[in-house]
Amino acid sequence: MQRFKILEYALSSLGRRKGKHLSIIAVYAFTISVLASILLLSHALREEASAILADAPHVVVQRISAGRHDLISTDIIDPVRQIPGVGEVRPRYWGYYFDGITGANYTVLGIDDRRTVELELLEGALPEAPGECAVGGGVSELREAGIGDELVLVDSRGVGVIFEVVGAFRSESNLLTNDLVVMSNADVIEFFDLPQNRATDLSVEVFNPKEVQTVAAKIKVLYPDTRPITRSEIIRTYDAVFHWRSGMVLMVFFSALIAFCILAWDKATGISAEERREIGILKAIGWSTSDVLELKFWEGAAISVTSFLLGLIAAFVHVFLLDAPALAAVVKGWSVLFPQFRLTPSLNLYQIFVMGFLTVVPYVASTVIPSWTAAITDPEEVMRA
């Protein structure tokens, strides 16, 4: 019962100095919201990338020439298929197309049948006949080309080619399909004027996931001018990119961290004369030192926990309901044809716990410690001072 009375008094004490405490909560919550927004966005994007790459090829084989990605010969498909543990080996035909009309870059992907892409159609069908294509949501919106409309693209020879839009795509994430134009392999080869027996890269299926690295190493030994890239390496690359970008944004908002440090330092260096007088009065009417410290603990905990929850809620709304307008362009990357999508809410409890520990605990400590020095001082001396 006594503890509830102390908690009740702590809340009423905070209410008597509303302006000061509301300003502290505002700064505190803003700092938490900035940090939490960056952490929530980067974690959600890493989860999004992992979901996208769940069905990626086990190994992608590229040819490297002068340190750059070059077209690969399809003649090596059969020798690669003979490696123990290797299943299907398919050539992939794709490339990038700059649209001079909109100033955007599209990804043009070739398919042979429905098994070569792991995408879910929103409506329509995959291209089957020559001159047909399916487009991502961003391309459809930018070129105002829906199903049944025509999409005019200029091929590598400078000739305009008319494609009939027969489908529009969606997948588990619009990060994959927003700038996508899907055609048949024959149309991609013709559009980019690819040489005979050449592909953009090879997709290699490995029966046993534990042998992926072994298969990649054998391909590298057989063909030293190739670069086998495993699915796990692609996921690690995305993870590193988002970590780097979130770290860069944290540096941009470093001023918010400085503001919080100044706030905590100000609390730690002492308490106001009014607060010291209040402590002296409480000691004079019979409060023990432990009662005073418990009072200050509840005051600091009420402010810090309230600020932490408000900041966390604001970050959640900013990232998952408003699509993080203040951070998305930096963390996701710059693009003319930027993917608009809703991130799946995803919380990293470890990150939340660490952030709470590094912000709530120091603030509570900086509230209790200065109060201890006043609580152990003679009440008469405190009130005179």
Image (spheres, rainbow, N blue to C red):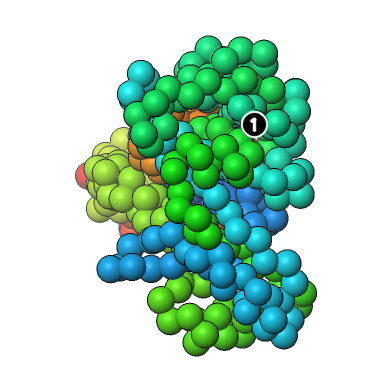
Count of numbered labels shown in the rendering: 1
Seen in the picture, residue 160 relative to 105 is either above or below; the reply is above
Q: What's under tag 1, amino acid-wise?
A: Pro
Q: Residue at x 33, y 24 (%)?
A: 100
Given residues 225 and 43, the one toward you in this image is: 225
Given residues 197 and 33, the one toward you in this image is: 197
Q: Quadrant of residue 216?
A: bottom right
Q: Residue at x 55, y 50 (%)?
A: 93
The x and y percentages for residue 149 are: 61, 12
SS under mark 1: loop
Q: Residue at x 62, y 79 (%)?
A: 79
Classify the position of the N terminus by image quarter. Answer: top right
Residue 80 is at least partly visible in this image: yes
Disc 1 crowd rating (10 Å Cα; few below 14, some 14-19, many 20+) is few
**In the drawing, does residue 27 fall left or right of residue 15?**
left
Q: Quadrant of residue 123?
A: top right
Q: In the rendered image, which residue does mark 1 sit on?
A: 130
Given residues 73 and 174, the one toward you in this image is: 73
Q: Residue at x 43, y 81 (%)?
A: 224
Residue 305 is at least partly visible in this image: no
**In the drawing, does residue 99 fall left or right of residue 341?**
left
The x and y percentages for residue 211 are: 68, 82
Q: Quadrant of residue 176?
A: top right
**In the drawing, does residue 164 fall left or right of residue 262?**
right
Classify the position of the C terminus by image quarter. Answer: top left
The x and y percentages for residue 112 are: 69, 46
